[in-house]
Image (tube, helix red, strand yellow):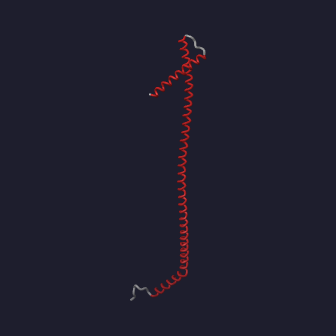
Amino acid sequence: MENPLLPPIPELVIGLVAFLIVFIFLGKKLLPNINKVLNERRAAIEGGMEKAAAAQTEAQQVLEDYRAQLADARHEAARLRQEAQEQGVALIAEMRSEGQRQREEIIAAGHAQIEADRKVAAAALRQDVGKLAIDLAGRVVGESLADSGRQSRSIDRFLDALEVKSADVTKAEANR
């Protein structure tokens, strides 16, 4: 009786011959092509890795250059900021001094204008007071003091006496 698990011998021989034909075919034709493709792929991968390493080295160099440029730019920005602050301080000081000078000019011009206005007002007041005094004196004396030379001398004496009296009163008040 035959063993059902063992195949018949002729089938076994045919299977073995078919296997050897496929094995020889694969070994002679297909395996060299596969090895060639694998070798090409390995070379491409190794070349790619070398290129990647070179690219990484170049990228690292570019990164270092960028960092150096960034540090230089930061230093330059800090220097420019400092320079701008110094210029701002100088400009503020210049503007203050210019403002101070203009203020002093305005004050001086104002004092000069006030002094000129005071002199004009004093002269006008002196004339008005003189006319009033001449009219009053003419009424009191009963004669006309129309002589301009006499009028002028009388007015000057009267106003000079008033100024002296006013100066004496001011000194007395200041001594208290």
Viewer-side residue, 106 vs 74: 106
Question: Can you give x and y, in whole percent of width and height, for residue 12 in the image?
Answer: 46, 86
Question: Can you give x and y, in whole percent of width and height, for residue 83 in the image?
Answer: 55, 51
Q: Residue at x 55, y 82 (%)?
A: 28
Q: Going by the picture, which residue comes out furthest to the left?
A: 1
Question: Can you give x and y, in whole percent of width and height, for residue 80 in the image?
Answer: 55, 52
Viewer-side residue, 48 vs 119: 119
Q: Quadrant of the N terminus?
A: bottom left
Q: Residue at x 58, y 12 (%)?
A: 144
Viewer-side residue, 67 vs 80: 80
In the picture, measured across the screen, residue 105 lies left or right of residue 16, that is right
Residue 173, compared with residue 103, is above or below; it is: above
Question: Can you give x and y, in whole percent of width and height, for residue 156 in the image?
Answer: 56, 20
Q: Quadrant of the C terminus?
A: top left
All told, the count of numbered labels is 0
Q: Residue at x 56, y 26 (%)?
A: 119
Q: Going by the picture, which residue comes out furthest to the bottom?
A: 1
Q: Residue at x 54, y 46 (%)?
A: 90
Q: Quadrant of residue 73?
A: bottom right
Q: Going by the picture, which residue comes out furthest to the top?
A: 142
